[in-house]
Image (cartoon, grey):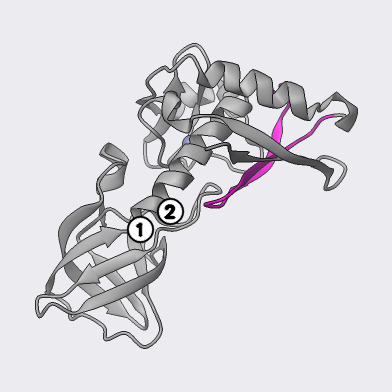
Amino acid sequence: MTELLFRDDAYLKTATARVVAVRDDKVELDRTIFYPLGGGQPGDTGFLTRGNGDRVAIADTRKGETPGSVAHVIATGSALPEVGEAVSLEIDWERRYALMRLHTALHVMSCVVIAPVTGGNIAPDKARLDFDIDITLLDAEKIALGTNELIARGVATETVWITDEELDARPELVKTMSVQPPRGAGRIRLLRIPDIDLQPCGGTHVANIAEIGGIQVLRIRNEGKRNKRVEISLTG
Ligand SMILES: [Zn+2]
């Protein structure tokens, strides 16, 4: 198990950790600030610094082979650290913060477009959600306006934990049909944006939706019978 420091504080840019396993080009640590690919949010990139001062680039972050572990993918050609070694970590904060802002923006937008979510993805420069909806009901201007009006409320986001049983009793919380929340761990993490959104999510979010600034709709496209895609970017 890797201690997931980003779960409690998504704003950690640096941390220290110890290497617990090295497999091929993947390094596992006892704790990490690197978010592993999941829920439509890409894995973090950055650096780890070894005791001898060498900086090793981390090209990607994935879930590890064992449940609850995180695999840091070392960039090709970098020397691998050794098991037991103490290292310091640094994420590419500019990239991650853009992902946090866009990720939180998708939560807000999912409350403007009222339809089941059938897919989604986040990149540092744009993000998208797919909806099961009649495409003629998707109006780019209205979606941007509605989303930006909610963002302007400037409310703080909250993390809430509930049990599997509580989630079973409230199936309406699961909007994203393609990404069911992980069960079996006994408890599920929710993101709450007071009076706007509440849904299971293990990703990283901004502390206050005002940090999103504003969004624009880049395009709306038909990607299949149940996938009408709305792509957005930040306006600043
Ligand atoms: Zn989320």
Q: Residue furthest top?
A: 195
- Dot label at residue 148: none
- Dot label at residue 95: 2
Label 2: which secondary element: helix
Q: Nearer the viewer, residue 171 or 40?
A: 40
Location of residue 49 by image quarter: bottom left
In this picture, residue 193 sits left or right of residue 222: left
Q: CA distance from mark 2 to mark 1?
A: 6 Å
- Disc 2 Cβ-to-ligand 1 distance below 8 Å: no
Q: Is residue 155 magenta?
A: no
- Graded by Cα atoms within 10 Å as few (under 14), some (14 to 19) or many (20 or more), the crowding at tag 1 reads some
Q: Report whether residue 204 is seen.
A: yes
Location of residue 137 by image quarter: top right
Query: Residue drawn at (44%, 24%), measured in percent from left and top?
Result: 210
Segment colored magenta: 111-133
Q: Nearer the viewer, residue 235 or 228?
A: 235
Measuring from the top left, give residue 141's x and y in whole percent.
75, 25
Location of residue 106 by image quarter: top right
Q: Nearer the viewer, residue 190 or 44?
A: 44
Q: Report whether residue 230 is seen.
A: no
- Disc 1 Cβ-to-ligand 1 distance below 8 Å: no
Query: Residue drawn at (48%, 32%), measured in percent from left and top?
Result: 212
The residue that mark 1 highlights is: 92
Q: Nearer the viewer, residue 29 or 235?
A: 235
User: Which amino acid does the dot numbered 2 rest on?
Assistant: Arg
**Residue contact at pointers 2 and 1, CB within 8 angstroms:** yes
Measuring from the top left, give residue 198's x and y in whole percent.
50, 22
Measuring from the top left, give residue 145's x and y in whole percent.
67, 21
Quarter of the picture containing the N terminus is: bottom left
Label 1: which secondary element: loop
In this picture, residue 191 sits left or right of residue 137: left
